[in-house]
Amino acid sequence: MDNKKEITRSVGVVGVVTLISRITGYVRDMVIAYFFGAKAETDAFYVAFRVPNLLRRLLAEGSLTVSFIPVFTEYLEKNGKEEAKRVSDVTFTLLFMVLILVSILGVLLSPFIIKLFASGFKGEIFNLAVDLNRIMFPYIFFASLAALSMGILNSLKRFFAPAFAQVAFNIGSIAVIFLLHQSLNIPIFSLAIGVIIGGFIQFAFQMPFLKSIGFLHSFSKNLRHPAVKKIALLMAPQLFGVAVYNLNILVSTQYGSHLPEGTVSYLYYSERLMEFPLGIVAVSIATVLLPNLSSQAAKGDTEKFRESYSFALRLMLFLIAPALTGLIALRVPICNLLYQRGEFTYDATLSTSQALIGYTIGLWAVGGVRITAPTFYAMQDTRTPVIFAFLAFIVNAVFGYILGFTFELKHTGLALASSISSIFNFSLLFFALNKRVGMIDMKNTLIYCLKISVASLTMGLTAWKISTLFEWTQSGISIEKIGIFLASVVGAAAVYFGLAKVLKVEELGFLFSLIKRKSGRA
């Protein structure tokens, strides 16, 4: 199969399932917003949840997965399935042991951890965050094993199960909230219990798929397998790099704990909205891209390596640009429809939409980092992204303080600082890759970006103009609200794709031809 077609087809599978995952995730957020709003106790929950979630990204989805996939793929390509299975087993065994230790330490050290993440929390809010953190900390155990399973399945080009596992997590969490919310003395504990049960379901869901291809996890006695050293050498700088990257979250949360009540929640809800297109587009592309790049690097196929990255970056920009302008133009209607009901007020909608502007400005750069960093990982270079991530962290910390406190932009300033940091990070990665591989035609790239910028800005103005037919102050959902919102989205999409066709954006023609070919086969 043609390389572009293979990437697009796989991205389509991951993207569709990720879309379902994001929708169920927003249903979960809507349930939380309805029952708890954006108050002190939700701030406590989101701080407590960020800790094991950050460690999951640090230990599993971050450093381990991106270090494991290139090595696992290399053994699979050069030594065959049997040896690759040994690599996956020894990795599972060591990860299992580390996660048990980390989970125990996390429960015991919860007061110190919460103080590190949110020193502004005092009294009851602090104690609540500690209790919630202790309940949720073992989530890292299940979620990290689920991430390893995802790495194995993705390396073998099985993308459906890992993507759908997050859907299973969301459904399990929602069910627990409804079942336990009214029966607990402290209702918000239902959220923490839901996280643990959802994490277990997320891990267990992938087991039948691993078994069907002969890679079901089993314990290994050969902990000195040469792959362990290779993965560890790649992990060491990457572990630091992911730690630095996720320190941005720590900085925002820490700053937020010193700002007015609800700040942490505003940041969380707006960040979740930004992650919707990011997950469907950039993360889906990156999920497919890393195994492809790793395989091409292992074979020494430089030409296909270049082609894969260039195409993936252009495809990401083509799809993320309208999402960026759409989120900004429709920020209030989106927050109103998704969150404004029950305990979530119109003031919370405005505050969340303000933070959303700050995050969304850098959406294209976050997507660029997700696409570009895997090229270094595939070449088994984890050092370069680490250095750039550290510099970006400093930028985020400095601008977060200046914008959030000195200029008193509060939650909007913290979100904007995150965008500035991402733009800085992507710029460094992009030019470093271009210097190393020489794959980027700068003139054509700038022309391409200008075309999609014109199309997306015009689209954003269209969406905003249609949305002004409603004031968006009322809580709840109505037919009029949904109708105007859908009209804004459909009208904006028509404008974007229409202008893309007029401006002869190649990616539009490629996507349409692929859809037509699929329809013809159907």
Image: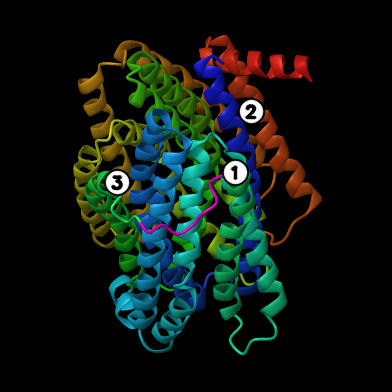
- Residue shown at the point (32%, 80%) measured from the top left: 109
**Image location (x, y in percent) of residue 458:** 54, 25
Residue hosting label 3? 231
Q: Nearer the viewer, residue 352 or 116?
A: 116
CA distance for labels 2 and 3: 44 Å
Residue hosting label 1? 18
Query: Are the residues tagged 2 and 1 within 8 Å (C-beta)?
Result: no
Q: Which element is circle 1 on?
A: helix
Classified by dominant secondary structure, the portion drawn in magenta counts as: loop
Q: Which element is circle 2 on?
A: helix
Q: Is residue 79 above or below residue 55?
A: above
Q: Amino acid at mark 1?
A: Thr
Label for residue 453?
A: none
Q: Amino acid at mark 2?
A: Ala
Q: Which residues are magenta?
A: 213-221
| Residue 460 is at least partly visible in this image | yes
**Disc 2 or 1, which lies upstream in sequence?**
1
**Disc 2 or 3, which lies upstream in sequence?**
3
Q: Is residue 65 above or below residue 436?
A: below
- Residue shown at the point (74%, 56%) measured from the top left: 477
In front: mark 1 or mark 3? 3
Instruction: Inspect the magenta stretch and tell me whether residue 200 lies in it.
Output: no
**Which quadrant is home to the N terminus?**
top right
Q: Which element is circle 3 on?
A: helix
